[in-house]
Structure formats: structure tokens, C-alpha cells
Amino acid sequence: MRRRLYFLLPDTSVAQQLVNDLLLARIETRHIHVLGRRGRDLANLPQATVLQKTDVVHGAQRGAILGAALGALAGALFMIAFRSDLALPLATILVWALLGAFFGFWASSLVGAAVPNSRLKRFQVWIERGMLLLMVDVRPRDTRAIAELVVRRHPEAVSGGMEPTIPAFP
């Protein structure tokens, strides 16, 4: 598990300097993500992926849960409506629930890919004004040291807070 730190930066040169400092502090490039206004050239900065820019993960989670619930309900209604003499009525409901979860996961992740990340909504105003959002995922024990490094080396960086946990995936 990691914690995600957020920093707002004024331009790409400051962002590049900060990325270099993070690399020297042994933060791997795959744990550093930069997000800017749509169409903005981020040069050689590690750009945020679709998973960080959009609500794909959140949508997929909600869709799988809702789809499983609706699938189980549909399976139960199927059993009641057809009063079938199936030997395994619970298995029928389970299969419907799994199919519903899969469909919900698929459909909601497609919708989530078209929606901006809800966790980044608080930064949207500054991003639209031209600032860059730097997200860095660090181990809990390194959180304070990295935050102090950024404040000490880059006073122009505005801290955007921290998310308590980031799963090991994606």
C-alpha cells in the first residue's frame, strides 16, 4: 500500500526539477504522475494514465457490485417464474450474479473512462488555469520525508494534501 501526495506546480520546468528530485530520492518513475490541462505539452514528464485521469476504477467497482446484485435478483426471478426443477437453484442464482457482475463491471468501466476522476475534482480549477498536478505514490514511512523535500526544495509548489491509501494495483 502507498499514500498519494498531491502538489500543484506552476509550470513544466518546476515540475521537471521536482521529478528529478523525486528520482534522486529513489521514487520510481512509475510512482510519479503529472496531469495538466487537456492539450498541454508535458514534455518528458511522466504523464498520468487513463486510470488516474478518469473514473474507470471507481466506475468498474460500482458497476460490478450493482451488476452482481441485479444479476442475483434476476436469477431469483428466473427461478420463481419458471419454477424449474433444477437440482441446484442456488448455483443458478450465483451464475446470474456473476454474469451481472461481469456486465456491470464492463459497462461501468466504459462509462467511467469518459468521466474525469472524481478524486481530482478539487484540483480542476487550478489545472484549468494552467497549473500542473503532480501525484506521487510513496510508502507510508516515506510520506513525511518526501513532503518535506518538496517544501524545502520547491517553495512554489502548493501542497494538495494526501490520500491515505492507494492499492498496489493499478
Image (cartoon, rainbow, N blue to C red):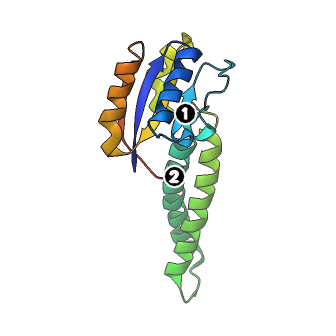
The quarter holding residue 13 reads: top right
Query: Quick check: 11 above or below 105?
Result: above
Total marks placed: 2
The amino acid type, in three-letter code, at marker 2 is Phe
Query: Quick check: 18 above or below 163?
Result: above
Q: Residue at x 63, y 57 (%)?
A: 103
**Left of 21 or right of it: where is 16?**
right
Q: Residue at x 59, y 83 (%)?
A: 84
Residue placed furthest toward the top: 129
Circles 1 and 2 in contact, beta carbons < 8 Å: no
Mark sitting on residue 47 = none
Q: Residue at x 38, y 14 (%)?
A: 155
Foreground of the two, 54 or 151: 151
Query: Quick check: 80 above or below 119?
Result: below
Percent from the top left, x then y, of residue 19? Answer: 52, 28
Foreground of the two, 129 or 98: 129
Q: For marks 1 and 2, give the one nearer the viewer.
A: 1
Query: What residue is shown with label 1?
Result: 33
Query: What residue is shown with label 2?
Result: 169
The amino acid type, in three-letter code, at marker 1 is His
Q: Secondary structure at mark 2?
A: loop
The quarter holding residue 116 reads: top right
Query: Quick check: 110 above or below 8?
Result: below
Which badge, 1 or 2, is on the more N-terminal residue?
A: 1
